[in-house]
Amino acid sequence: MRALEIYRNGILAGILKEENRRHYIFRYDDQYFKDSNMPPISLTLPKTQQEYSNTFLFPFFSNMLSEGVNRKLQCTQLKIDEDDDFGLLAATAQYDTIGAITVKPISVQ
């Protein structure tokens, strides 16, 4: 299992987990979820429920990834399988992203 902390403007918003290549979970952080002043990270992941589960990486996160030649170059340089969206997200969305969302890999036991 792999996991990422998801930050919105530097504030921990939740945890994204890859249980396996067919099971992904996004869960809002308790404090972030309870704070009515904090907006959802995406229109597709509203704060109407605290945990979301899917059989593929949520489109909101997939859309943060490069495509085409840029993706191929990143995967080659970072030695990441081109089909590993979660790994590519972890490697490329930590610092300089378009928008308010950044990620930080965490170790999960």
Image (spheres, rainbow, N blue to C red):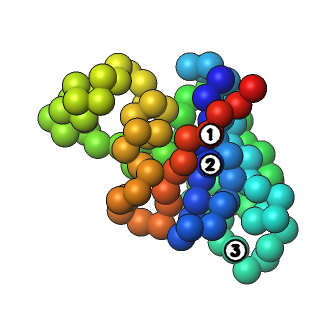
Which quadrant would residue 55 be assigned to in this image? Answer: top right
Q: Secondary structure at mark 1?
A: strand
Who's the residue at 62% across and 48% down the image? Answer: 5
- Circle 2 is placed at which residue position? 5
Q: Secondary structure at mark 3?
A: loop
Residue at the bottom extreme, as displayed: 37
Label 3 CA crowd tier, 10 Å (few <14, some 14–19, many 20+): some
Mark 1 → mark 2, Cα distance in angstroms:
7 Å
Asked if disc 1 and disc 2 are in contact, CB closer than 8 Å, the reply is yes
- Circle 1 is placed at which residue position? 106
Left or right: residue 81 versus residue 71 is right
Disc on the earlier residue, 3 or 2: 2
Q: Position of residue 41 (x, y in %)?
A: 60, 61
Q: Closer to the camera, 62 or 14?
A: 14
Q: Position of residue 70 (x, y in %)?
A: 19, 39
- Circle 3 is placed at which residue position? 38
Q: Position of residue 71 (x, y in %)?
A: 25, 35
Give the residue type at disc 3.
Met
Give the residue type at disc 1.
Ile
